[in-house]
Amino acid sequence: MSDLAEQVAAWENDTAVDAISAAERKRVYTALYQSHLPKLDDAGIVDYNQNRGIVELSTAAEQIDPYLEMDARDDITWCKRYLALAGVGSVAVAASSFGIPPFGGLADLSLAVLVVVAFALVAIAHTVDARNAPTTGEQSPAIEGE
């Protein structure tokens, strides 16, 4: 239990285990002892012996692994895709204003429709991706000593 409290405190404070303060460790220890571990024990996720301070994963913990796995895709974030599309749209509008091909021959309304359709397609792809993504894409923190 003590090792677990130290590791969680280090994750929460984005620091190494040996750099956490006694207050940070105690705050996490108290929360684990009074709330989190008893609830996880009741749910069958961990086997928690409160008197001895021993915590072990139960065999049922494997059932929640798919929900805890992180999406390790290393692709472009959606905000960058929208930003790039806005940049391309701006360049297209500027090219149209100055008569630069191929946008110079497009009517303003046609160009506006083209940009709106492009944003709609990216938004649809974003929605589909978000619905199919198992997690937020955050990397899980490394456990010291592994």
Image (cartoon, rainbow, N blue to C red):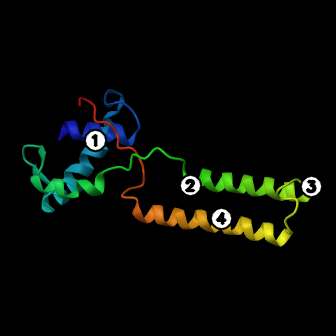
Q: Which residue is mark 2?
A: 78
Q: Earlier in the sequence, mark 4 or mark 1?
A: 1
Q: Earlier in the sequence, mark 3 or mark 1?
A: 1
Disc 1 to disc 2, how far (Cα)?
39 Å
- Residue under the image location 22 percent in, 40 percent down: 4
User: Dividing the image into 4 quarters, which one contains the C terminus?
Assistant: top left
Give the residue number, with chain letter if any, for mark 1: 26
The structure residue drawn at horizontal position 40% and vertical position 63%, both measured from the top left corner, is 132
Residue with the mark numbered 4: 119
- For the residues marked 2 and 3, what is the alpha-carbon distance in whole angstroms? 30 Å
- The residue at 67%/51% (across/down) is 84
Q: Secondary structure at mark 4?
A: helix
The residue lying toward the viewer, choosing from 87 and 102, is: 102
Q: CA distance from mark 3 to mark 4?
A: 23 Å
Q: Check if mark 4's residue and mark 1's residue have beta carbons within 8 Å.
A: no
Q: Which residue is mark 3?
A: 98
Give the vertical position of 67 relative to 145 (above or below).
below
Q: Residue 77 vs residue 82: left or right?
A: left
Side of 78 where 96 appears, left or right = right
Q: Amino acid at mark 3?
A: Phe
CA neighbours of label 2 inside 10 A, class few (<14), some (14 to 19), many (20+): some
